[in-house]
Image (cartoon, helix red, strand yellow):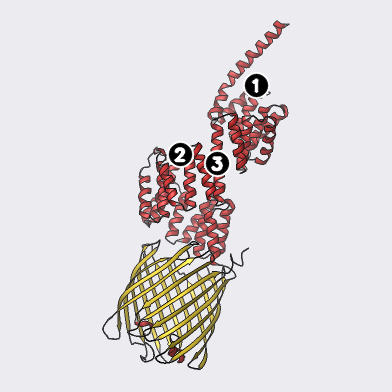
Amino acid sequence: MNIKKSLICLILFLVNYTYSQNMQEGFNYLERGNYKEAETFFKNILNDYPSNKTARLCYGRAVGLNGKADKAELLFIDLLNDFPNDFEVKLNYGESLLWNKKFKPAKAFFKTLITEDPKSFPALLSYANTLSNLKEYPDALNYVNKALEVSPGNPNALTSKKYIYLGYAYQKQQDQEYKQAESLLRENLKTFNNDKDTLINLANLYLIANQLEDAEATYNILAQNPENELIALNGLALVSHLNNKEKKALKLSEQAFLSLNENTESHITHSTTERYIQALIWNKKYKTANQLISSLVEVSPNENWLLALRATLNIYKSDFKKSVTDYNQILVNDSTSFDGNLGKANALKALGFYNNAYTSAENTLKFYNKQKDATNFINNLNTTFTPFWETKTSYSFDNGDNKAYNIQTGIVFPTSTKFKWLVNYAYRNTSNKVTNNDAISNTFDAGFAYQLLNNITLNATGGITTANANGENFNQFITNVSLQIKPFKLQMLDVGYKREIQNFNAELIDREIVMNNIYLNYNLNTNFNLGWFTQYFYTWQNDDNARNLLFTSLYYNILSKPALKAGLNYQYITFKNQVPNIYFSPEKFNAGEIFVNVVKDEGISKPKEWFYELTAAAGLQFINNDSSQSTYRFQGKLGYKFSQRCLANIYGIRSNIASATAAGFTYTEIGLRFKWYLFNSPVFRK
């Protein structure tokens, strides 16, 4: 009997050994990641041995890893029914849930396996990975550490731990908890010294947090490994761009681009080419950028990254309609595209399609929750349509002994992206101790602004000026009606009619001079930094006088951040009648000046930041046929943005240009301005 049992055991051993040897080829396929071959191999084995558990397990794994997760899950369910107490079968069934992204059921299932065997390395690691997929990162770290206690130094567990840290840090980054995100990434670097993925994520975090020096230092660490040099150069180029060092950005990106060869990985070639084209655009080398994009589009006409670059180029060139066309194609290719959704939002905003811009930005956040750029875009757009109160008070004086105190206050109250109410009140007190004249004027006007078309806005206000000059009272109707038009790209045109009272000094108020103005403002920008502004006024007055005024300015934009421009101004004025004893009214007046203007605009300033503007000009003026006279003009302001809703600035003006009132005239004005947004967001948006 014992001999018989021994013989049976020997036969079973030989069969089992021979069988496992026969499956070794399939095991090798699985280990090497050749899942298609493994699937075919084990399917053939099962044709001969349909009930073999090992073959069924391996076939299920090959099917699942070959992209057929649903089918694999069904195969493991069948196995689980046949072997309900087999721990290895349970582990594979749990893994099939992960393949199918059924993370909540997987969490519950692996929890039962850990209860069954607290020291099972695969159960602990799979549970940690499940928690990571559910973004339950603290618990995921806890269980991956338990897995490493069971199998110290296990490479699979260490890889999982690395990506759990990366996911956890990204979650903190999205929540704008930048310090916590940095701490997690630095903790990761303690385990994975100078790990490429961790350093890239850390540098990106510093970019988002605007810690540009830290980002540069991190990219320099990354560059210490020659294999990462191109990634580092691309990052350093972006840092230079954010530091407004466009030439340096181009130099770095060009260095990376010229280093590309046939052995460079395709995704690195892609990102390096993309950065180089971006740097060309930042430096306004539009022709070169367009040629490179066009050559790449000929080879790959429907690649999203190339369409996005072309759209970006057209945004810089103010060809917003072309940008929208490309962004629409990107979204046809991939509705979740970040570049497509947010890029389209920016282009639509520039075109004046504000509701559609909101929609595109909100679509971005549907796919990229709490994404900073999309959130900032919506916040900035909200600011455009949030009601605000603005007030300005000033004191002015001149060498003709005129003094004036002025207060202006008003509210702009948008009720939609197309319509806003305008209300304004102004008080002016002027006096002259030499002529013993004094006057007080109160002006109230109200109206609206309505966007007729995306590129045409109607502004209309009307009201009353009440004045008391030397004991005499009068009332006059005032109005201002204009159309703001964007006829073509890079162009702005205002045309309008304005009725006002001449209120520069007490004597002019006393004469109750009504000015009727038809005016035109035209501004032309170019893609090569030149700009041209022209203003024309035709004025007829109730004292039977008339005026023509032409002002034109040709300027060059030297820098963009801060905005720095310089140029030439020319002014021409003529009056029908000359009444020099009453007001400056030459038969002809010509003035020319050169000017420099530097500005950090309040619109781009962040809370807790200063903003400023300074203009200096000098030139010559010619009054009738008299000899030329030198002129100067200084204007400046300095302000502070206390919060997103509140800002204030002081300003000053000093000028001796005769067109203000009379020849030999100097004028000084100092003032204070305060602006406060009444709400956190537009009243028409919840």
Type of the residue with mark 1? Asp
Looking at the image, tell me whether mark 3 or mark 2 is earlier in sequence order.
Answer: 3
Give the quadrant of residue 401: bottom left
Residue where numbered disc 3 is placed: 165
Left or right: residue 451 versus residue 547 is right
How far across and how far down the image is residue 190, in percent?
A: 50, 38
Looking at the image, tell me whether mark 1 or mark 2 is earlier in sequence order.
Answer: 1
The quadrant of the picture occupied by the N terminus is top right
Kindly check if marks 3 and 2 are in contact, taking CB atoms under 8 A apart as contact. Answer: no
Residue where numbered disc 1 is placed: 48
Q: How many marks?
A: 3
Kindly check if marks 1 and 3 are in contact, taking CB atoms under 8 A apart as contact. Answer: no
Residue 44 visible in the shown view: yes
Foreground residue among 177 and 465: 177
Type of the residue with mark 3? Tyr
Element type where label 2 sits in the image: loop
Dot 3, crowdedness within 10 Å: few (<14), some or many (≥20)?
many
How far across and how far down the image is residue 277, in percent?
A: 40, 51
Q: Is residue 196 above or below residue 499?
A: above
Dot 1, crowdedness within 10 Å: few (<14), some or many (≥20)?
few
Looking at the image, tell me whether mark 1 or mark 3 is earlier in sequence order.
Answer: 1
Give the quadrant of residue 131: top right
Residue where numbered disc 2 is placed: 194
Q: Residue at x 39, y 50 (%)?
A: 292
Type of the residue with mark 2? Asn
Q: Residue furthest toward the left?
A: 627
Kindly check if marks 1 and 2 are in contact, taking CB atoms under 8 A apart as contact. Answer: no
Element type where label 3 sits in the image: helix
